[in-house]
Amino acid sequence: METKIFKKDDIPEAVKLLKQGELVAFPTETVYGLGALATNEKAVKGVYAAKGRPSDNPLIVTVADEKMMAQYVENIPERAQKLINHFWPGPLTMILPAKEGSLPTAVTGGLPTAAFRCPNDALTHELISQLGAPIVGPSANTSTKPSPTTAEHVYHDLKGKIAGIIDSGPTAIGLESTIIDLSVAKPIVLRPGEITPEELGEVLGEEVLMNKGTAVTAGVPKAPGMKYRHYAPSAPVYIVDREEDFNSIPHGDDIGVVALDSVLDKIEAKNKFSLGTSIDEAAHNLFGALRFFDNQAQIKEIYVQGFKQGDISAAYMNRLNKSAAGHHFEKNN
Ligand code: TXA
Ligand code: MG
């Protein structure tokens, strides 16, 4: 299958393809998503196949607005309404009880809840509005690989497997949306993102917990996708927690180094990839960096800068920890 690259004027063609049950990748402010008509079970199954994604990992339901979401929930709880008013469209996904029978099992993974997201992207808003129905929206990468922050990343992973990619340039944030579970007694963040638990708590007027590890309710893992190895290039990744430790990491043609300019400027290394000049830029560049070295067979180890400061550092470290399988560089090891 030919994978077409769509621009602004091609939205009607992308809508037509989605209506026919084809897969079209779409831009958001976080990462690119892989779209299929959410009410078409066969199309949704095609998403799992294209990504190589385990079928027990439910998909986000991507809507144009609150009105569209209302068709797939029994009601909109007060907490959800507050968060919608404040953060939508934006990088926040909400888990809510789904209206029974309104979504195929392939979307929800058989859970009584569903994940709803309304991205802040003009082309994607236009796409879903014209379609008149939600699209599923997992990140548009091959399962276990870093999420795509450019149309080129999507093309690299999915060319020949999907009908098209809507290209609107690099994404703004670079890490996936914050996921908050509102289907439980106490709201809890299942996946950290740019919007922090503190910000959510301020809007809700109550404490919002942060899930540490794998939360499990009645044997069902929360945000099932978080349990898999993720964001991982083929070479092992090591987190370097302290800037000065970059002086002690191994040297060689087969070593990749990923850090801020301020660090890279001070060290000798053959294969450097810049994270930019700040933690926000680092969040934006992390997945691209992992992909850059993943595509180079001679790279055998990748050393990546860790961060403790900054609102987005929790989200950044969450993704980096998964790609490194928790491995930190230890001096004298
Ligand atoms: O920023 C984003 O959220 C991107 C863009 C494309 O919208 N999408 C994204 O989707 O990151 P995905 O599929 O890569 O991650 C969605 C996560 C998975 O970990 C999945 O297990 C979880 O949401 N999830 C989906 N439905 C759920 C549910 N009903 N309960 C708990 N977790 C759920
Ligand atoms: Mg993903």
Image: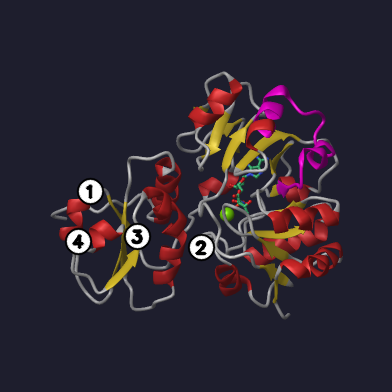
Classify residue 191 as left or right of residue 120: left
Q: Which residue is mark 1?
A: 242
Earlier residue among tags 4 and 3: 3
**Residue bearing the label numbered 3:** 237
Q: Give the mark nearest the N terminus, 2 or 1.
A: 2
In terms of depth relative to the viewer, which is nearer, 86 or 151? 86
Task: From this view, report whether residue 76 is shown above or below residue 109.
Answer: above
Q: Amino acid at mark 1?
A: Arg
Span highlighted in magenta in the image = 61-84
Q: Residue at x 59, y 26 (%)?
A: 187
- Horizontal side, residue 164 vs residue 67: left or right: left
Kindly state the secondary structure of the residue where label 3 is placed.
strand
- C-beta proximity under 8 Å, tags 2 and 4: no
Give the Cα separation between the discs numbered 1 and 3.
16 Å
Frontmost of labels 1 and 4 is 1
Q: Are marks 1 and 3 in contact (CB under 8 Å)?
A: no
Q: Which residue is mark 4?
A: 249
Give above or below for 206 relative to 100: above
Q: In front of the other: label 2 or label 1? A: 1
Q: Based on the picture, tell me whether residue 76 belongs to the magenta stretch.
A: yes
Work out whether 203 lies above or below 60.
above
**Label 4, label 3: how many angstroms apart (C-alpha)?**
12 Å
Amino acid type, label 4: Ile
Q: Which residue is mark 2?
A: 145
Q: Residue 20 occupies which quadrant of the picture?
A: bottom right
Q: Marks 1 and 2: in contact by CB < 8 Å?
A: no
The three-letter amino acid code for the residue at tag 2 is: Lys
Q: Which mark is residue 321?
A: none
